[in-house]
């Protein structure tokens, strides 16, 4: 840690120690109150806490309950639902609800609230894609029937990720003052500073041990300073701080599919017609370039050097999840093999300037990353340095997300993804999503891959679909992984790192999705002081 950073951390510690936010005074603070916690784990939602607008997709919605959820083995289990069935044609999903659920204002949760939630989400045109849903209807107070426009095995994930809101209390300001049936109740939100929640006394599930939790919205640097000052129970930190122990706290490094990778434009410039923004790239449209970068990158070195060891090599968008194909793993860091691929693809240094050429095109392209993201910048620099001896020039540049959105169809981008829903894989690689939002920004197209993914989507069950997702990655002949068309160079999966008080148990965490939201709190009902247990 250099002197400037030490000074900044010291200043942050002083500021944090002087905070006078409610519940955060030096005297009587939550650390001494055994049924309260103070967390600095970032994740303040820009749009508030409304599931109909996407809140809760990357972790527990906290205030709301979902019909289903995934346990630590990634198995779908019941939450609000008691049971469900799917018709033989895959179009009708019937869900039976438990009958003992109250919202935190003591109003019963019924099928009417479920119908209202999904109809509102459909109309909101949010990040939650419900275009597959034709209709949703309450058959009685505790039975809901969903009718789909076409079979979709991933529909179960929408039922898993969407929190149920109360029809009677879903007003214009709901996102700022949410009400639900989840384990905690909203108390206070000071934007940019803190969120205070309390345990829901009417929660139908296992009652949380902790009665009050304060979320501090601090940068990871400030969170580390707060941990050193003894002001928080949990702090989310970046890898560079992980080698600096904090007295009274342990390091928890949790596996994730929070990945980082390079998306390559896969078509030649303007190959897809007229667009408002530029499309296509003469260099990355060549599969030899994409494969050479994939082969040259030493992913283990990236984990050790950029992530300080807190991560794992990434080969797909879904490593280690049930629908991942382990045959996609490659022997990377192989410059010799990368040179062979380039030579076979017709790339040569004909003018002796150290950069390869093919058909008067130099092997030089721009790699964009979101400015201010230190990890992505470091990854971009490392990849650029690694491929330079091959004769590939990667120029890196930090841009705003608004700029990236305009440029991403014509230039490589260092993106981050990672979801518990295989629909994300469909969105990243299917030709139907070309140019839609940030999905398939490189205009990748492989009819065989499309076919496998359509079969996966139309499968009768999630498990039946897994084999098709795996084949879409690599079937022995083609696929969307490196061994096939290599439309991406996936680099690393980032471990989510937290400093946790030595005497605090956060239970057994399942593999985390992308870092938006609060995946850490997904099992918050299990948290307690060690060795005490609930009811002790």
Image (cartoon, helix red, strand yellow):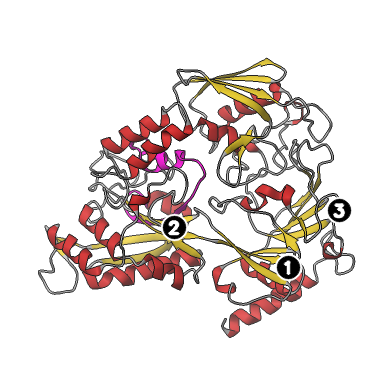
- Quarter assignment of residue 247: bottom right
Seen at 54% across and 32% down, the residue is 156
Residue reaching furthest to the top: 139
For label 2, the residue is: 260
Measured in 3D between alpha carbons, the distance from the residue under mark 1 to the one under mark 3, in whole angstroms, is 19 Å
Q: Please state the horizontal and vertical placement of residue 526, each as a whole percent of the image.
A: 73, 50
- Residue at x 64% of width, y 49% of height: 45
Residue 502 - label? 1
- Give the secondary structure at mark 2: strand
User: Of callouts 3 and 2, which one flags the residue occurring earlier in the amino acid sequence?
Assistant: 2
- Callout 3–callout 2 Cβ contact below 8 Å: no
Camera sees residue 116: no
Vertically, is 12 above or below 472?
below
Residue range (magenta):
408-434
Q: Is residue 375 above or below residue 162?
A: below
Q: Which mark is residue 9?
A: none
Q: Nearer the viewer, mark 3 or mark 2?
A: 3
Which residue does the numbered mark 3 point to in the structure image?
536
- Residue count near mark 2 (Cα–Cα under 10 Å), binned few <14, some 14–19, many ≥20: many
Density class for disc 1 (Cα within 10 Å; few <14, some 14-19, many ≥20) is: some
| Position above or below: 183 against 39 | above
For this view, does 513 lie left or right of residue 445? right
Q: Position of residue 312 (x, y in %)?
A: 46, 62
Examine the structure image and report whether residue 415 is included in the region drawn in magenta.
yes
Residue 533 location, x and y as percent? 80, 54
Report how far apart the C-alphas of labels 3 and 2 lie in the structure: 43 Å
Whole-angstrom CA distance, mark 2 to mark 1, is 31 Å
């Amino acid at each position: 840690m250099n002197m400037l950073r030490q000074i900044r951390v010291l200043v942050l510690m002083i500021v944090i120690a002087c905070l006078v936010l409610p519940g955060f005074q030096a005297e009587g603070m939550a650390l001494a109150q055994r049924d309260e916690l103070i967390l600095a784990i970032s994740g303040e939602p820009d749009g508030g806490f409304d599931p109909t607008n996407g809140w809760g997709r990357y972790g527990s919605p906290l205030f709301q309950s979902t019909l289903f959820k995934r346990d630590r083995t990634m198995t779908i289990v019941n939450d609000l639902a008691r049971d469900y069935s799917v018709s033989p044609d895959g179009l009708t999903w019937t869900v039976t609800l438990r009958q003992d659920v109250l919202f935190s204002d003591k109003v019963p949760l019924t099928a009417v609230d479920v119908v209202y939630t999904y109809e509102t989400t459909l109309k909101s045109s949010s990040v939650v894609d419900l275009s597959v849903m034709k209709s949703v209807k309450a058959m009685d107070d505790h039975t809901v029937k969903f009718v789909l426009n076409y079979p979709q095995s991933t529909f179960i994930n929408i039922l898993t990720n969407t929190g149920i809101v109360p029809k009677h209390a879903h007003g214009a300001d709901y996102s700022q003052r949410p009400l639900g049936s989840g384990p905690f109740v909203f108390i206070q939100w000071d934007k940019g500073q803190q969120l205070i929640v309390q345990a829901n006394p009417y929660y139908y599930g296992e009652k949380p041990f902790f009665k009050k939790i304060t979320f501090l919205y601090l940068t990871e640097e400030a969170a580390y300073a707060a941990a050193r000052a003894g002001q928080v129970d949990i702090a989310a930190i970046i890898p560079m701080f992980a080698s600096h122990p904090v007295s009274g706290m342990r390091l928890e490094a949790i596996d994730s599919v929070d990945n980082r990778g390079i998306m390559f434009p896969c078509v030649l410039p303007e190959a897809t017609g007229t667009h408002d923004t530029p499309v296509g790239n003469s260099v990355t449209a060549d599969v030899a370039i994409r494969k050479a970068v994939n082969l040259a990158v030493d992913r283990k070195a990236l984990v050790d050097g950029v992530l300080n060891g807190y991560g794992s090599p990434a080969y797909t968008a879904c490593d280690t999840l049930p629908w991942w194909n382990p045959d996609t793993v490659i022997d990377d860091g192989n410059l010799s093999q990368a040179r062979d691929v380039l030579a076979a693809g017709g790339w040569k240094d004909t003018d002796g300037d150290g950069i390869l050429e093919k058909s008067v095109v130099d092997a030089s392209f721009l790699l964009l990353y979101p400015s201010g993201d230190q990890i992505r910048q470091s990854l971009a620099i490392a990849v650029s340095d690694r491929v330079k001896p091959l004769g590939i020039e990667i120029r890196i540049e930090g841009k705003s997300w608004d700029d990236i959105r305009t440029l991403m169809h014509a230039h490589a981008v260092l993106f981050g993804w990672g979801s518990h829903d295989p629909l994300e894989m469909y969105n990243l690689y299917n030709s139907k999503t070309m140019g839609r939002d940030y999905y398939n920004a490189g205009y990748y197209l492989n009819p065989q891959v499309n076919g496998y993914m359509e079969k996966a989507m139309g499968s009768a069950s999630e498990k039946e679909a897994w084999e098709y997702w795996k084949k879409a990655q690599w079937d022995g002949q083609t696929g969307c992984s490196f061994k096939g068309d290599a439309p991406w160079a996936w680099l690393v999966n980032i471990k989510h790192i937290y400093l946790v008080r030595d005497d605090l148990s956060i239970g057994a965490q399942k593999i985390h999705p992308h870092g938006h939201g609060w995946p850490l709190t997904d099992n918050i009902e299990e948290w307690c002081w060690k060795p005490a247990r609930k009811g002790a």
